């Protein structure tokens, strides 16, 4: 019964004391219903209940009322616990869980637990008002949406929501705390339990109202306790619901973003394609009607777009680009400030431009505009227009903000893709142009083809043979002779036309530098040909071809600079190849030439053989880096000294090939003395050119010996700096050792050349002439070094006598003339005694016949720097002992 006013309206009076309405005989009492409900909710009790049914029935009325109440409470508690687990199981299986759904389930379970005739669920809205969320009685009228504000002296649920405490009342007539009675009008309600639904921080979420009608027993305190125990799960369930909804929302967002990322990044073909995908996915994410994406032009400070969402079937078709300043419109404001705008009514916002709606006839209602960042900079703005089912919410903003991060990555990669694609096209054009100019032309090809290849060349297998004496125009013919001989040695098929084009193109790709030029490559290839022919077929056919071609191409496109210079000058090659810079470049250039049409001299090899020969060529060319030589030679020497070397061991064979490349590269060091001495000027010229470049690019000359302007007077340099810091400078960097070139040559022969030749002779006895030639040259250099040392002693003695004379008589010091036996006035002094130059002057005809200048000793100008001071000095000390 809701209130006295309502009671008087229906003329209904409460029953007289002691007189209660009689029920039908078939109707069970509330206690019996509770027992049955408790047993039903606890299946484990069923067997015990069945076996003891007769005993329980016969003794139930014989027990005291207190025992009967305890049994009822026990059954209620069992029922409550069962209901809790059932609720949780239902919630875990429910994919549409929300607050109203959870509280409705809890209210129904509570009503069933206390055997209520009906229940009402009231929830609190944002205006702190109660509204009816659900009801159970069919006899009630249609509920009003709003019950009233949360305040006392109104209705029962409002009072309970205000006090946040549960309430049991068996008299709904004229209670001053809630004069309006129950929140929903009922004709027969006489007893009610109202329980508040509280959050963890004492926040009211709603009220559950349980009631019994006229004719039923009133609620007891035990039943109120049961209802409170049931509804205390509201907070726990609500927390679970929020967590569940959050996780499901995040999972859906993650799945969506994964699909977006996969779709966008797998199909980056152009910027327009990426923009169209972003707009389509953005509309799906926030359920918007239209989408726009504007990119930022930082130079002109404008926003521009080429793709437009027209809402028609042919939407997202590229149209004429539009541009507008960054300080206009909603998108301009977002691009300028980085602020996210969520506008519920566009026409009430002064930043909205209505001209677009007037032109298109489309009415803009709500707008969600978000900046797109990349590396902290705004690169674009994406704008959603008109949410289909209302206005854009805070949840839409959060989801869209996450989506905008992926948009920034996609746009950034799309720009990079466009740049790479344009660079690739430019690269193809450049390669096409360079290939045309770097390949031999038809005239060169025909001239070489018309020259007959000799069937035999006398003395070409002699280790003292001078490849520098051959005319430059005839060198390709000699190369073809040696290459043909290697192919025929093992009955390999070859194409002479391809060999001619390959040889001429290789010659054309050597630069006109003093030392690492075509003449040097030819001399190294000849040295390797001599080793191959005299080694009695110890190398396989593939290895022979790889060794010879590697020697011919081992310095392709050499710039006359060391690897250290490439790193110091920040050369692009040093950025590509961190170690063995020039050697990697030589190999890659070799492969490029082989890939040109009509240049593949290995086209008759099988796929496996072609792969193997390229691997061997790479191994051989990289072995010319002196930084790798010391480790390779040490391993090979150790194997040879232990007598473990075997030609059947692939690793041993590769060590021999690597050492053979270094021996061929240093071939000038075992050539006759007169030839070796005349090449000193050439190597010094390349040093000086590098010194000129160091002045320009690096700002100082790393090695004074490379400075042509200071060849007679080396100034304070790196050596002096090192000495001032207590370090010992390298001889080449020490100005005080400018005349010690013979000593440097002795150290180079003892520390590098002879160890290389000796291990070669130990494995291949046929290469013994290399050792003999190097030993003979070492003897000459030692004589010069001893002579230079004697001159130093004489100079010291003269200085000592001069000092003694100056102590006795103070006079002006005499002018010292240059020594007669050392030529220091020549512009390109070799720093060698004049008699040495006179002995070799008669054999200089090859210098005029070959352009550029003949190559100097190979070992002196490897791509790496000369051997370290430690190696040279230790070798000198061992030799002196």
Image: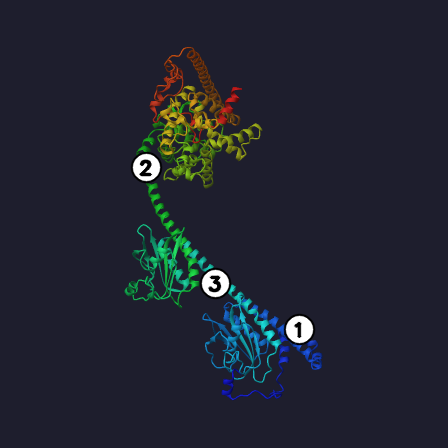
Q: Is residue 213 left or right of residue 530?
A: right
Q: Are marks 2 and 1 in contact (CB under 8 Å)?
A: no
In the displayed image of the protein, which residue is found farthest to the front? 176
Q: Position of residue 519 (x, y in %)?
A: 38, 28
Q: Secondary structure at mark 2?
A: helix
Q: CA distance from mark 2 to mark 1?
A: 98 Å
Tell whether 411 sits left or right of 5: left
Would you call the spot at circle 3 few (<14 residues within 10 Å), some (14-19), or many (20 or more)? Answer: some
Q: Is residue 230 left or right of residue 370?
A: right
Q: How far apart in space, not on screen, are marks 1 and 3 (Cα)?
A: 41 Å
Disc 3 secondary structure class: helix
- How packed mark 1 is, by other alpha carbons closer than 10 Å (few <14, some 14-19, many 20 or more), is few
From the image, state whether disc 3 or disc 2 is nearer to you.
3
- The quarter of the image holding the C terminus is top right
Q: Quadrant of residue 193?
A: bottom right
Q: Position of residue 664 (x, y in %)?
A: 45, 28
Looking at marks 1 and 3 on the same chain, the residue that comes earlier in the sequence is marked by 1
Does the rendering let one see residue 679? no
685 versus 331 height, above or below: above
Q: Marks 2 and 3: in contact by CB < 8 Å?
A: no
Give the mark toward the camera: 2 or 1: 1
In this rendering, the answer to whether 73 lies above or below 245 is: below
Residue indicated by mark 2: 437
> Which residue has dot 3 on it?
249
Q: Residues within 10 Å of mark 2 (few under 14, many from 20)?
A: few
Sequence order check: which comes first, mark 2 or mark 1? 1
For this rendering, which residue is in front, 489 or 109?
A: 109
Where in the figure is residue 477, as x and y percent of width and height?
Answer: 37, 29
Report whether residue 61 is seen: yes
Q: CA distance from mark 3 to mark 2?
A: 63 Å
Q: Which residue is mark 1?
A: 45
């Amino acid at each position: 019964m809701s209130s006295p006013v309502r009671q008087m309206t229906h003329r209904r009076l409460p029953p007289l004391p002691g007189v209660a309405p009689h029920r039908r005989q078939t109707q069970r009492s509330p206690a019996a219903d509770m027992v049955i409900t408790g047993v039903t909710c606890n299946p484990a009790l069923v067997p015990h209940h069945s076996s003891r049914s007769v005993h329980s029935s016969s003794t139930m009325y014989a027990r005291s009322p207190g025992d009967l109440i305890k049994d009822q409470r026990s059954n209620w508690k069992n029922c409550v616990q069962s209901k809790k687990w059932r609720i949780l199981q239902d919630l875990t299986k429910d994919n549409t869980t929300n607050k109203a759904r959870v509280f409705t389930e809890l209210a129904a379970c509570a009503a069933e637990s206390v055997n209520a005739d009906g229940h009402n669920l009231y929830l609190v809205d944002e205006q702190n008002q109660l509204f009816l969320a659900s009801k159970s009685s069919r006899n009630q009228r249609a509920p009003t949406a709003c019950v009233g504000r949360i305040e006392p002296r109104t209705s029962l649920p409002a009072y309970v929501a205000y006090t946040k405490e549960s309430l049991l009342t068996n008299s709904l007539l004229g209670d001053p705390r809630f004069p309006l009675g129950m929140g929903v009008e009922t004709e027969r309600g006489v007893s009610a339990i109202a329980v508040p639904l509280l959050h963890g921080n004492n926040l009211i979420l709603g009220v559950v109202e349980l009631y019994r009608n006229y004719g039923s027993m009133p609620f007891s305190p035990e039943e109120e306790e049961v209802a409170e125990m049931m509804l205390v799960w509201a907070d726990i369930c609500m927390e679970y619901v929020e967590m569940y909804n959050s996780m499901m929302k995040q999972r859906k967002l993650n799945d969506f973003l994964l699909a977006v990322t996969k779709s966008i990044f797998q199909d980056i073909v152009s910027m327009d394609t990426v923009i169209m995908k972003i707009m389509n996915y953005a509309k799906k994410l926030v359920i918007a009607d239209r989408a726009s994406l504007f990119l930022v032009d930082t130079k002109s400070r404008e926003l521009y777009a080429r793709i437009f969402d027209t809402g028609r079937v042919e939407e997202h078709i590229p149209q004429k680009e539009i541009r507008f300043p960054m300080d206009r419109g909603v998108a301009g404001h977002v691009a300028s400030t980085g602020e996210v705008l969520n506008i519920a009514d566009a026409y009430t916002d002064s930043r909205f431009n209505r001209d677009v709606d007037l032109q298109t006839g489309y009415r803009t209602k709500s707008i969600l505009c978000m900046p797109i960042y990349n590396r902290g900079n705004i690169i674009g703005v994406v704008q959603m227009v008109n949410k289909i089912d209302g206005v854009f919410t805070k949840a839409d903003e959060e989801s869209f903000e996450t989506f905008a991060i992926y948009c920034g990555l996609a746009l950034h990669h799309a720009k990079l893709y466009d740049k790479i694609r344009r660079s690739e096209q430019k690269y193809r054009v450049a390669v096409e142009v360079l290939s045309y100019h770097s390949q031999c032309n038809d005239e060169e090809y025909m001239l070489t083809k018309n020259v007959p290849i000799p069937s035999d060349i006398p003395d070409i297998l002699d280790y003292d043979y001078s490849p520098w004496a051959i005319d430059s125009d005839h060198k390709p013919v000699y190369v073809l002779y040696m290459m043909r001989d290697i192919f025929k040695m093992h009955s390999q098929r070859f194409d002479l036309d391809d060999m001619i084009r390959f040889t001429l193109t290789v010659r054309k790709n050597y630069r006109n530098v003093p030392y690492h030029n075509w003449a040097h490559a030819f001399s190294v290839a000849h040295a390797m040909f001599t080793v191959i022919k005299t080694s009695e077929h110890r190398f396989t056919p593939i290895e022979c071809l790889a060794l010879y071609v590697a020697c011919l191409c081992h310095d392709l496109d050499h710039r006359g600079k060391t690897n250290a210079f490439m790193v110091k000058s920040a050369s692009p090659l040093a950025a590509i190849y961190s170690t063995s810079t020039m050697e990697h470049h030589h190999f890659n250039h070799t492969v490029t030439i082989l890939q040109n049409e009509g240049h593949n001299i290995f086209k008759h090899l099988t796929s496996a053989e072609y792969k193997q020969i390229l691997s061997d060529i790479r191994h051989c060319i990289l072995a010319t880096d002196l930084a790798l030589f010391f480790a390779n030679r040490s391993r090979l020497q150790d194997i040879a000294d232990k007598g473990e070397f075997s030609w059947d061991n692939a690793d041993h064979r590769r060590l021999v090939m690597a050492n053979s490349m270094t021996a061929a590269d240093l071939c000038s060091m075992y050539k006759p003395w007169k030839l070796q001495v005349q090449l000193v000027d050439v190597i010094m010229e390349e040093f000086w050119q590098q010194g000129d470049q160091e002045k320009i690019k690096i700002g100082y000359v790393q090695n004074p010996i490379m400075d042509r302007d200071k060849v007679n007077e080396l100034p304070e340099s790196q050596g002096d700096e090192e000495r001032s810091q207590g370090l010992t400078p390298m001889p080449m960097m020490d100005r005080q050792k400018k005349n010690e070139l013979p000593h440097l040559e002795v150290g180079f022969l003892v520390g590098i050349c002879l160890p290389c030749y000796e291990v070669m002779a130990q494995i291949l006895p046929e290469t013994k002439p290399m050792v003999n030639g190097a030993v003979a040259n070492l003897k000459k250099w030692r004589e010069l070094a001893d002579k230079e040392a004697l001159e130093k002693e004489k100079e010291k003695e003269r200085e000592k006598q001069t000092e003694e004379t100056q102590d006795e008589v103070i006079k002006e010091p005499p002018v010292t003339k240059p020594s007669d036996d050392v030529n220091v006035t020549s512009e390109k002094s070799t720093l060698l005694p004049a008699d040495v130059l006179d002995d070799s002057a008669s054999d200089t005809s090859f210098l005029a016949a070959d352009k550029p200048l003949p190559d100097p000793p190979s070992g002196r100008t490897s791509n790496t720097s000369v051997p370290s001071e430690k190696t040279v000095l230790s070798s000198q000390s061992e030799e002196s002992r």
